[in-house]
Amino acid sequence: MAYKVTPWEVSGDIDYGKIVKDFGLETISDHLLKRIEKHTKELHPLLRRGVFFAHRDLNWILDEYEKGHHFFLYTGRGPSGHTHLGHILPWVLTQWLQEKFGAELWFQMTDDEKFLFKDGLELDQTRKLAYENALDVIALGFDEKKTKIFLDTEYAKTLYPQALRVAKRLTFSTAKATFGFSNESNVGEIFFTSVQAVPAFLPSVLKGKNTPCLIPHAVDQDPHFRVARDILPKLGYYKPASIQSVFLPGLRGGKMSASEEGSAIYTTDSPETAKRKIMNAFTGGMDTVKEQKEKGANYSICPVYHYYRQLFMPDDKELASLERECKGGSILCGECKNRLSERVSHFLSDHQKKREQAKHRIEKFMIRD
Ligand code: TYM
């Protein structure tokens, strides 16, 4: 079955190898991982395990870094609801990169985007959600001296003139080919990618010095930066580099979706709710206990396994042992889900404490005009 991956729609069977080819990405080689490790002394599990599997110009970012020309990080969130565990995946790596490379982070909250693209969401709601989502970002441990978070509608005086420079060089035909717009799309949607391009060069504008930019994100956001990479050099700025992850799958199998109850765990879920969602998850298990004990299960298609692999089991030996147990049929899905829900509950209660504390520090992170 064909797949579709755009910033607003992910559907079909996602074949990451095909995405690399279709999008024109580079895979992250062992050589590149070694280059990163030279500077960071260790590799984050998300890198070691290939959860971040593709990039654009990461070698160039390291070339510049080695010449003493430091990069800044840029990532973001479209505030259409509470944060789920998939959203935090790129932020976890971003926080690690900030710590290891001492990089500044520009974090964009696209409250305008979600207002434009989602029926029934008003601007005051997306704005409020942006502040909720910002608590999750802060709770992950970003450095308040090096992190700037902004809402598009609250930083518009700075962003808008730069967005105009991008928009003037972007035709409707390119936007249509890249994102699949139609005559029924509203004109705000067509303009919007110009706004998401801005933080990739805004620090260069503000500092009056061209500065390399590295954008961690899941692969759905790549179309925005393909456009930005075409246009920014025309404005005299570097093409932004990126490092791109696979998706954390939905617990019901397939993709995570806000409209499918139980497919995603939110950072605001109670441990009981998270446990219920995990216990109801689709797995790679067999139909009967007998069959599973005999034949083992298939972890590669199991969302429960991917939760361990991507976020909740950083120890490689432990993960390898879980894989053996699963394949050999010595662990059953109920037990495996139980163990995961303990880890997730532990994460959630700690994260929710930090989220509460973040309420007192949020103004240290926010920038506005
Ligand atoms: P949004 O809010 O859809 O997603 C926020 C970030 O989470 C990633 N993501 C996922 N990662 C792993 N597994 C998943 N299931 C999953 N679902 C979403 C997204 O790729 C993204 O990195 N327009 C953007 C906001 C934005 C942005 C940016 C994102 C503005 N500037 C720069 C990345 C980089 C959006 O709506 O993201």
Image (cartoon, rainbow, N blue to C red):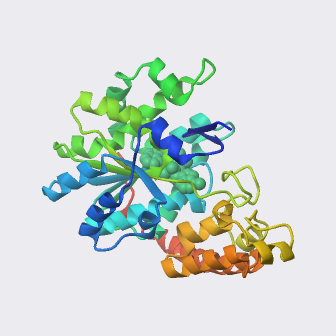
Which is nearer the eye, 327 or 347?
A: 327
Q: Is residue 285 left or right of residue 154?
A: right
Rendered view: 292 above or below 254: below
Question: Where in the figure is residue 44, as x and y percent of width and height?
Answer: 40, 69
Q: Is residue 104 left or right of residue 337?
A: left
Q: Is residue 67 left or right of residue 51?
A: left
Which quarter of the rendering shows the C terminus?
top left
Q: Quadrant of residue 149?
A: bottom left
Q: Quadrant of residue 336?
A: bottom right
Visible in this render: residue 320?
A: yes
Visible in this render: residue 77?
A: no
Q: Residue furthest front?
A: 294
Q: Residue furthest left?
A: 67
Rendered view: 286 above or below 314: above
Question: Where in the figure is residue 349, as x and y percent of width and height?
Answer: 60, 78
Name which residue lies at 34% across and 63% down. 97
Name which residue lies at 76% across and 68% down. 285
Question: Where in the figure is residue 288, as x and y percent of width and height?
Answer: 87, 71
Q: Is residue 167 left or right of residue 348?
A: left
Rendered view: 246 above or below 186: below
Name which residue lies at 24% across and 39% down. 238
Name which residue lies at 65% across and 44% down. 13
Rendered view: 260 above or below 296: above
Which is nearer the eye, 331 or 68?
A: 331
Q: How many marks?
A: 0
Which quarter of the rendering shows the N terminus?
top right
